[in-house]
Image (spheres, helix red, strand yellow):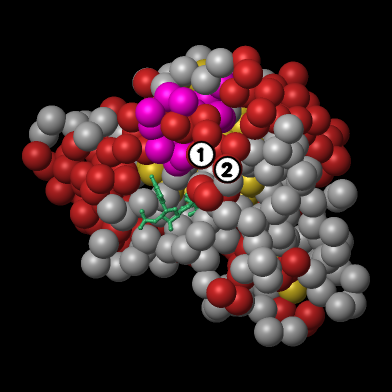
Amino acid sequence: MDTLKFRNNDPLHAIGLGTWKSEPGKVKHAVKHALKVGYRHIDCAAVYNNEKEVGEALTEIFKEGDIKREDVFITSKLWNNAHRKEDVKPALMQTLKDLQLDYLDLYLMHWPVAFKSGLEGFPESDDDFLSLDEVSLSETWEAMVELKQEGLIKHAGVSNFSKEKLQDLMKETDLIPEMNQIELHPYLHQSELVEFCHANQILVTAFSPLGSQDRTEAMKADNEPTLLENDVIKSIADKHSVSPAQVLIRFHLERQVATIPKSTNEGRIEQNFESYKLNLDGEDLQKLKDLDNHYRYVNGKFFETSDGKYSNIYDE
Ligand SMILES: NC(=O)c1ccc[n+]([C@@H]2O[C@H](COP(=O)([O-])OP(=O)(O)OC[C@H]3O[C@@H](n4cnc5c(N)ncnc54)[C@H](OP(=O)(O)O)[C@@H]3O)[C@@H](O)[C@H]2O)c1
């Protein structure tokens, strides 16, 4: 398996298992199966509402004895309703309780967006948001860094951060984020942001690598393109006798980027893991580069407010 290195040389398996939308009743089996077939990197989040079941899977696997806690890299994310400094540690403690762990390998600020403390569900009006003047990203970030100093998390990072937001954070705090988890795939290369991260020793993880087709219809744009059915991707897959998903996963490894395809299906979990064995050549990579049309599946518009607190989340 391709491995990336954090600033302190801690390794990260470049293919992990995503768990957003992994249903209760399925996610436990998915996580256990993934670990049994070789995954050592699991991506979780409080807002996925399935961390308790992921925790059961981890506990059962560790009890079996072949795989130990320290063999598995576990990420979770701070939800937007806990950005005030006094809310950050309690949110982590709830995640640790649900996952039945005493530390996380990586904790990410899920979005550069703050809701009112403790807000349940999604905001229904502008009043449910806190502006970044009321709770700055650096306030939240500094509270996350304290968790690292306390030994509750091994690495701290962010998600959905633009280059501008990273630069602002880097000006205001001592610890540069160690990870930026962002949407990336052949329709969305974000080369400038990836290069900026790498130049600053910020690892990058690609989310929605397969085009996130299991999102609810409400989250989908009309006529959105289907990555897995793209003719260029299919032709590269045919050339190497692999599946389109495997091309989409390997694409990130060629860029020194980690990726976390989600599946609850045994066969697809295995297939996705096996992508590390594929080798894409220069011609394949050029064809994938030419597909870049800056298309986002997760476009962030659901966090825009009409009072101007939040607009243009990605600063583009
Ligand atoms: N930080 C963030 O804001 C953020 C945002 C989005 C996602 N994420 C993370 O990134 C992970 C992955 O992104 P995602 O869940 O949006 O979508 P994704 O991984 O791009 O796509 C998941 C979809 O692809 C299907 N699939 C999986 N393997 C396949 C294969 N080999 N062939 C064909 N179809 C396949 C899955 O179905 P089956 O399950 O039925 O196989 C599911 O419908 C998430 O689960 C989450 O952990 C983070």
Whether 161 is among the magenta residues is: no
Check disc 2: other Cα within 10 Å, few if <14, some if 14-19, many if 20+: few
- Foreground pick, 119 / 206: 206
Query: Is the residue marked 1 within 8 Å of ligand 1, measured from its CB?
Result: no
- Residue underneath mark 2: 231
- Magenta part mainly helix, strand or loop? helix
Residue at 79 percent of width and 80 percent of height: 126
Asked where in the image residue 149 lies, by quadrant, the reply is top right
Residue at 12 percent of width and 42 percent of height: 63
Give, as a single range, the part of the protein colored magenta.
Answer: 239-256
Depicted 207 relative to depicted 93: above or below: above
- Foreground pick, 276 / 300: 276
Q: CB under 8 Å between callouts 1 and 2?
A: yes
Answer with left or right where residue 308 lies relative to residue 203: right
Residue 66 spot, x, y in % from top left: 13, 30
Q: Could you give the CA–CA distance between mark 1 and mark 2, rounded to whole angstroms?
A: 5 Å
Asked where in the image residue 276 lies, by quadrant, the reply is top left
User: Which numbered disc covers residue 234?
Assistant: 1
